[in-house]
Image: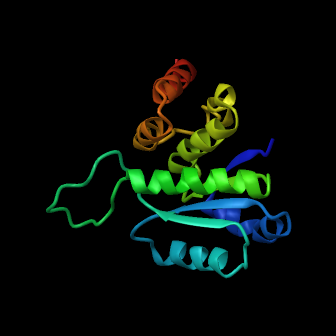
Amino acid sequence: MAKVNIASLQAVVDNIDTIKRNEYNLISIRDTSPSSVTEAQYAMIDNAGLQNLLVVNFDDLVSPLPADSMYRERPPNEEDIRTILEWSKQKMQENNSNFIIQCTGGISRSSAVAILVRYLQDPEKAIKVINPILHRPNEKVLEIGEKLLKVEGIKDQTKEILKKHDE
């Protein structure tokens, strides 16, 4: 069974040659309004010639910002998560390579997606992919994932693990 790893944008950039050489399946979750620094880092990934790269754009939000907000960030939607799940299933059948799931900090969006990708492999071990010391999975990603996977409890189990750790 392929491993599912969670990484920050910086960690992916720092290890891009290893990722390319080992033909990892890389899911790159990007901000909808990147800074000049993250834009340059995204370009490094895009120009690395990776064979198994999926890029999705959504921000670490759980609900939309008010219409009059000066920011243009947006939370994940069903299309984003459906794309990730379908691409992941396809890659599991095609190459059985390890996955790296990356967002800016490697804390919230990527950890939530990692749970869902791991669920596709082994539902019993899905939540074990996160480290409660490092990760705080985005609840909206988990909620959409539950709906698309037609399961319940992923979000609640994740919250319970985090709660126990925080106590």
Instruction: Locate residue 153 relative to residue 17 in the image: left or right.
Output: left
Position in image of residue 142 (x %, y %): 47, 38
Where is residue 16 shown, x and y percent of the image? 75, 69
Quadrant position of residue 14: bottom right
Say whether residue 23 is visible: yes
Quadrant placement of the N terminus:
top right
- Viewer-closest of 54 and 75: 54
Q: Name above or below for residue 67 compared with residue 62.
A: below
Where residue 108 sits in the image (x, y, percent)?
51, 46
The vertical placement of 125 against 83, above or below, is above
In the picture, measured across the screen, residue 142 lies left or right of residue 97, that is: left
Which residue is pictured at 77% across the width and 45% down the height?
3
| Residue 153 x, y percent position in the rendering | 48, 24
Q: How many marks?
A: 0
Is residue 164 positioned above or below 12 on the image? above
Q: Is residue 112 shown above or below 17?
A: above
The image's colouring method is rainbow
Picture residue at 79% right of the left edge, 46% below the top: 2
Is 40 in front, or is 113? 113
Left or right relative to 69: residue 113: right
Residue appearing at x 48%, y 26% in the figure = 159
Name the residue: 47% across, 30% down.
Answer: 155
